Structures are given as C-alpha cells and as structure tokens.
Amino acid sequence: MEASDARVLLIDDDADVRNALSRLLRSAGWSVTSYASAEAFLESGALDDFDCLVLDIRMPGVDGPELHAILRAHGSLLPVIYLSGYCDIRMSVEAMKLGATNVLEKPADADLLLQAIGDAVEQHRQDLLRRHAVDAFGSRIDTLSPREREVMNQVIMGRLNKQIASDLGIAEKTVKVHRGRMMAKMRVRSVADLVHQCDRFGLDETVAI
C-alpha cells in the first residue's frame, strides 16, 4: 500500500498493542496519534483532526461503542475500525449498528488492517466532500430572496413560467427575472441540473421559505 497523508487515531488500553500498531501504520506512511483511553482522547479536544479511528472495542471506563456514540452525537464523520480481543458478539453487533466500517479480531492481520484503514480513509474523504458540497448548496439557497425561493419551488415541481405567474399572482416577465436570478445564484444552467442537485444533496422538492 502506498504512503498517504492520512491521519490515523489509535485508541487501545494495551500499550504493547498501541506500540506495535503505531509502528505498522507509520511504516505504511500514515501519521499516527495514540491514546490509552477514550477519556484521554476526549480530554484532548481533537475530535476532528483525523481521517480514521482504530478503536479497541472493550476498554475500562468508556468503551469503544460508547466513544463511537459520543462522536456520532457530535456529528463526526470519522470512520471507525474496531479491534476485538474477545469476539463479544453483543458488542460487535452494537459496533456495526453505530456504523463501524470493520470489526477485526486481535491480533489483527497486518494486510487486512492496512486495507481496512485505506478503505476507511477513502470513505472519509468522500464523506467530507459530500458534506462540503451540501453545505455549499445550502449556502447558495440562503442567498435567495423569499420570492426567488418561491419560484425555485415551482421550477423544481416542473411548473412553467406562465403557471408560476398565475400561482404567485405576478407577471410572467417578473417570474423570468426571479427565475434568472435564482438560477444564477444556484450556479446551475438548466432545470435538470437544479433538480439533480436537489436530489443529490437530499433536499425535498420544496425549499423552506
């Protein structure tokens, strides 16, 4: 596996495991930061500084799934790979329900772990790209005037300018002006593109006014 600029977070209460895995991951070209407990990591405040989390599923105090739940509650997109030394079915199921990308048994096979991390890092990058795109699309919607939003709602529903004018009680030429400004602010060239972006970013047909 080629070296990358990925930042891997490793949390495991076993010092020998931390040291061995840190050496392995650094040999693959990744930056590694390790903690002996979930509490120590949370106290660091570095919740958004990593691309992948390799996490011991069972630890004293806050265990793996509990930390994962905390991260999700904070809106974290950080992909989580669990390491399990006990093959606890209940905790493994809980981990998968929380959205774990993988659960590997200790001692983890080096090739499997490196591949899992590589896949998780790529997933994280794609998730961040999508989040940034959604945020940017939402910001463009925020620049619309109330009337432009009304026109956008009608356009998305496939209404013609004449129909929009009738529904909104305004002149058709006024609809054309609002429609042109809306399309420019949304940075789309066609209705199909506008509808595609709304579908892509999970927006409803009707944009809140």
Image (cartoon, grey):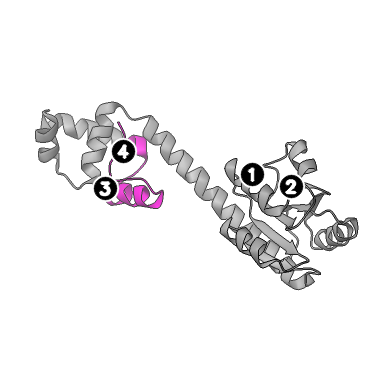
Mark 2 vs mark 4, CA separation in Å: 41 Å
Which tag, 2 or 4, sits closer to the chain's start?
A: 2
Q: Position of residue 189 (x, y in %)?
A: 31, 45
* Pointer 3 with pointer 1, Cβ within 8 A: no
Mark 4 vs mark 1, CA separation in Å: 31 Å
Q: Residues within 10 Å of mark 4 (few under 14, many from 20)?
A: some
Mark 3 vs mark 2, CA separation in Å: 50 Å
* Pointer 3 with pointer 4, Cβ within 8 A: no
* Pointer 1 with pointer 2, Cβ within 8 A: yes
Which tag, 1 or 2, sits closer to the chain's start?
A: 2
Q: Which residues are magenta?
A: 183-209
Q: Residue at x 28, y 47 (%)?
A: 190
Amino acid type at circle 3 is: Val
Task: Say which residue label 2 marks.
Answer: 62
Which dot, 1 or 2, sits closer to the camera? 2
Q: Residue at x 21, y 46 (%)?
A: 157
Q: Residues within 10 Å of mark 1 (few under 14, many from 20)?
A: few
- Residue 191 shows which numbered tag? 3
- Residue 207 shows which numbered tag? 4
One can see residue 53 in this view: yes
Which dot, 4 or 1, sits closer to the camera? 1
Amino acid type at circle 4 is: Val
* Pointer 4 with pointer 1, Cβ within 8 A: no
Res. 137 image quadrant: top left
- In the image: residue 134, left or right of residue 148: right
- Residue 70 shows which numbered tag? 1
Which tag, 3 or 2, sits closer to the chain's start?
A: 2
